[in-house]
């Protein structure tokens, strides 16, 4: 009897202990409020606004709402000067402070500390240094570190973009269109010209080590695929088959180059082994197959085909050659790029009954398509290596510009550029060695 | 006169239509309003009804009834026509009335808010005292049920507050799950948040914990009885499991 009673008590206590459980399945995803306090500066040779670059980077990511400097109750530079209550009073959740100094050997060093106001603790201490020419690299490295700490994914502020810019040039006797292949920081700064041609340049594509760029040039009067070596500034012609040579795409391991050739009479997807120079035909269909792009693991290619009467995205398996249609929503889906974690495809999309082309995101697991942009003639989406942002070409006031949108569609901004037409953007992979880009 | 024969009826018809349209425009179209306000907050109304059986003086009742009237005030034009054909705003108030009328004299029913005068007439008089035990049991069960409903309405408020404070990091994906244990004090203030089960993504876990810290205080919990607070909200678990992300 006593035993029974004990059992009963144990049972009852376990019932009483059963805690109330509430499930949260939605969120607002408002940008997180962060205060980037102006850094103290003791380096005389500073020419760039490192603090301003960090703030702009974080703002552009769409995940952060930096507090304007005039709303700050104080501007601390050391941990001892940070008073959490005053940051709490202006609803700031994180505070970033920093000090810039010269290390005595001609290098600029920036030390930053990041504080969590809600938990009243320091959560990151980071320092970056570099030469006078690397001030922007220092700033982007700080942004990357902060972004990674707060979002759980690496920042992509230190990466580059390649693109083609063009302009009509008028001489006394003729009008010619001038094309340039350019690279720049992702914020549009530090533009560098790789090539100039009076013939079209198309489809730049980065090698996975970010040291080479494959592209299509019409400089011989017909299309050919070239590879530009950024270290040596030497370029090399890869293919110039009769007919079309277009849309090069590096495989994730850097060994293969997928491309479109029409040497058999109609555009199909081919894969070129860059070491053995062997060519393998991946698709054989009388429809047009174009715009190949690799899955992140290199196991398959996605491409655009009009075999069903209108452009849709298909996938071909590298090992088996098995082909499969991926998109069914909308009457135009093209130029697919797969996110690095394989969770989604970014593509150009036109909905049934509409005439506008938008950048959209297809969730691979669910098959749903969400339009991300509000501009109307969107082209050439390219995804940041961390998958957080999509860069694309669109038109503004009759001129081609580059614009970016976060993958959740919440933040949109334009990349500043000179007065030239800009198109065909390609976002670089992560860059291991930044000094590489400082060379002329 | 020939035109009269040809156009007479159509003319009359047209004039009638115009008059009809004019009348509708002038007098107003009352039919639509009846459909315009289907939404109500049943949980709150239930809660106030439960308090009524206390053999209380009229002052206490006024306190209880004022919030209800505030809520019903905007609905007045709608709620008046409704009860006449169908005398139940919600099933529960109907059940409560007979019990009250046994224990309390009729005068108490009269100062009640709107729904009661409609509901009071039913079957009450023929009940015997023998049934009182059963009724008490029923009463308790009903009270427990309505208490649960009240708890649920508090849960809904907590959910709404946490959801509006939750900013997921870009690395968040549908299907991730983090479990937190939250400790409150009776003012609704958050005193401690701890991670009971990680999602495997540190930024995701932090975003969940920060959402609770950002709420700081669940203001709506302050009016709750301390028994209810101790039983449910002193310490509870929050599961963060996004289902609305794009990826």
Image (cartoon, coloured by chain):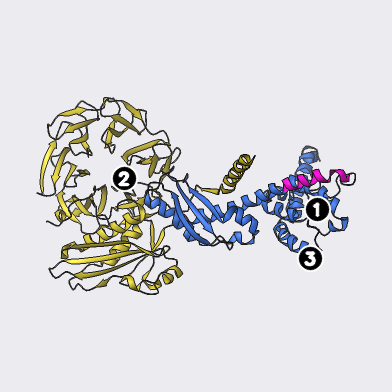
Estimate the spatial distance between the alpha carbons at disc 1 and disc 3, rounded to whole Å: 18 Å
Between A117 and A242, the one lying in front of the other is A117
Residue A80 position within the rendered picture, expressed as x and y whole percent measured from the top left: 33, 72
Circles 1 and 3 on the same subunit: yes
Q: Secondary structure at mark 2?
A: strand
Is any part of residue A262 visible from this angle? yes
Locate the N terminus of chain A and report the quarter of the image it occupies: top right
Of all chains in the rendering, the one displayed in yellow is A
- Which residue range is magenta in the image? B125-142
Residue projecting furthest to the right = B126
Which residue corresponds to the image point at 30% horizontal and 34% vertical from the top-left? A302
Between A157 and B182, the one lying in front of the other is B182
Residue under circle 3? B59
Estimate the spatial distance between the alpha carbons at disc 2 and disc 3, rounded to whole Å: 69 Å
Which residue corresponds to the image point at 15% horizontal and 50% vertical from the top-left? A196
Circles 1 and 2 on the same subunit: no
Packing grade of label 3 (10 A; few <14, some 14-19, many >=20) is few
Q: Earlier in the sequence, mark 1 or mark 3?
A: 3
Q: In this rendering, which labeled residue sits more in front, label 1 or label 3?
A: 3
Which residue corresponds to the image point at 68% horizontal and 54% vertical from the top-left? B44
Q: Secondary structure at mark 3?
A: helix
Residue A357 position within the rendered picture, expressed as x and y whole percent measured from the top left: 38, 43
Residue under circle 1? B116
In the picture, measured across the screen, residue A77 lies left or right of residue B57, that is left
Q: Which mark is residue A381?
A: 2
In the picture, measured across the screen, residue A251 lies left or right of residue B104, that is left
Tell me which chain the residue with mark 2 is part of. A
Of all chains in the rendering, the one displayed in blue is B
- The quadrant in which residue A219 appears is top left
């Amino acid at each position: 009897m006593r035993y029974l009673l004990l059992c009963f008590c144990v049972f009852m206590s376990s019932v009483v202990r059963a805690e109330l459980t509430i499930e949260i399945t939605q969120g607002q995803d408002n940008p997180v409020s962060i205060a980037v306090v102006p850094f103290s500066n003791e380096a005389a040779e500073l020419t760039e606004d490192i603090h301003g670059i960090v703030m702009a980077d974080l703002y552009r990511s769409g995940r952060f709402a930096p507090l304007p400097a005039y709303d700050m109750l104080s501007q601390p530079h050391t941990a001892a000067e940070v008073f959490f209550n005053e940051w709490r009073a202006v609803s700031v959740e994180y505070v970033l402070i920093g000090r810039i100094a010269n290390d005595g050997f001609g290098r600029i060093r920036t030390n930053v500390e990041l504080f969590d106001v809600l938990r009243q603790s320091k959560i990151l201490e980071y320092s970056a240094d570099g030469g006078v020419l690397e001030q922007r690299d220092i700033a982007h490295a700080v942004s990357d570190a902060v972004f990674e700490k707060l979002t759980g994914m690496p920042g992509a502020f230190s990466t580059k973009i390649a693109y083609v810019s063009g302009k009509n040039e008028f001489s006394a006797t003729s009008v010619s269109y001038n094309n340039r292949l350019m690279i720049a920081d992702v914020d549009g700064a530090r533009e560098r010209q790789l090539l100039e041609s009076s013939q079209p340049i198309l489809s730049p594509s980065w090698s996975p080590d970010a040291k080479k760029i494959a592209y299509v040039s019409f400089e011989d009067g017909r299309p050919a695929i070239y590879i530009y070596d950024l270290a040596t500034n030497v370029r090399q012609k890869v293919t110039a088959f009769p007919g079309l040579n277009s849309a090069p795409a590096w495989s994730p391991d850097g060994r293969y180059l997928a491309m479109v050739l029409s040497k058999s009479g109609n555009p199909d997807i081919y894969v070129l082994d860059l070491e053995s120079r062997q060519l393998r035909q991946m698709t054989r269909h009388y429809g047009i197959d174009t715009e190949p792009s690799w899955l992140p693991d290199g196991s398959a290619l996605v491409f655009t085909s009009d075999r069903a009467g209108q452009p849709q995205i298909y996938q071909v398996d590298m090992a088996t050659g098995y082909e499969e249609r991926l998109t069914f929503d909308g009457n135009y889906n093209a130029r697919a790029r797969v996110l690095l974690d394989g969770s989604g495809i970014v593509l150009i999309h036109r909905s049934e009954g509409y005439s506008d082309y938008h950048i959209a995101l297809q969730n691979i697991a669910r098959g749903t398509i969400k339009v991300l942009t509000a501009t109307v003639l969107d082209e050439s989406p390219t995804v940041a290596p961390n998958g957080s942002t999509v860069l694309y070409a669109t038109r503004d006031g009759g001129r081609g510009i580059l614009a970016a949108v976060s993958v959740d569609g919440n933040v949109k901004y334009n990349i500043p550029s000179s007065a030239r037409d800009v198109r065909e953007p390609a976002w670089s992979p992560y860059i291991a060695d930044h000094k590489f880009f400082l060379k002329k | 006169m020939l035109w009269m024969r040809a156009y007479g009826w159509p003319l009359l018809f047209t004039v009638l239509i115009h008059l009809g349209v004019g009348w509708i425009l002038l007098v107003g179209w009352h039919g639509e309003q009846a459909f315009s306000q289907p939404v109500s907050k049943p949980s709150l109304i239930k809660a106030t009804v439960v308090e009524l059986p206390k053999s209380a003086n009229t002052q206490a009742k006024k306190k209880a009834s004022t919030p209800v009237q505030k809520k019903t005030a905007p609905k007045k034009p709608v709620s008046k026509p409704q009860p006449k054909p169908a005398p139940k705003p919600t099933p529960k108030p109907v059940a409560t009335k007979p019990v009250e009328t046994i224990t309390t004299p009729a005068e108490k029913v009269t100062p009640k808010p709107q729904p009661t005068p409609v509901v009071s007439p039913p079957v009450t008089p023929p009940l015997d005292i023998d049934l009182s035990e059963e009724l008490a049991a029923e009463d308790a069960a009903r009270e427990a049920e309505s208490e649960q409903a009240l708890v649920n309405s508090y849960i809904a408020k907590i959910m709404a507050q946490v959801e509006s404070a939750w900013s997921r990091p870009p690395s968040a994906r549908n299907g991730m799950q983090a479990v937190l244990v939250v400790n409150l004090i009776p003012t609704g203030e958050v005193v401690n948040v701890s991670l009971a089960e990680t999602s495997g993504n540190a930024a995701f876990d932090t975003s969940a914990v920060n959402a609770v810290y950002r709420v700081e205080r669940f203001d709506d919990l302050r009016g709750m009885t301390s028994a209810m607070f101790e039983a449910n909200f002193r310490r509870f678990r929050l599961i963060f499991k996004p289902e609305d992300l794009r990826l």
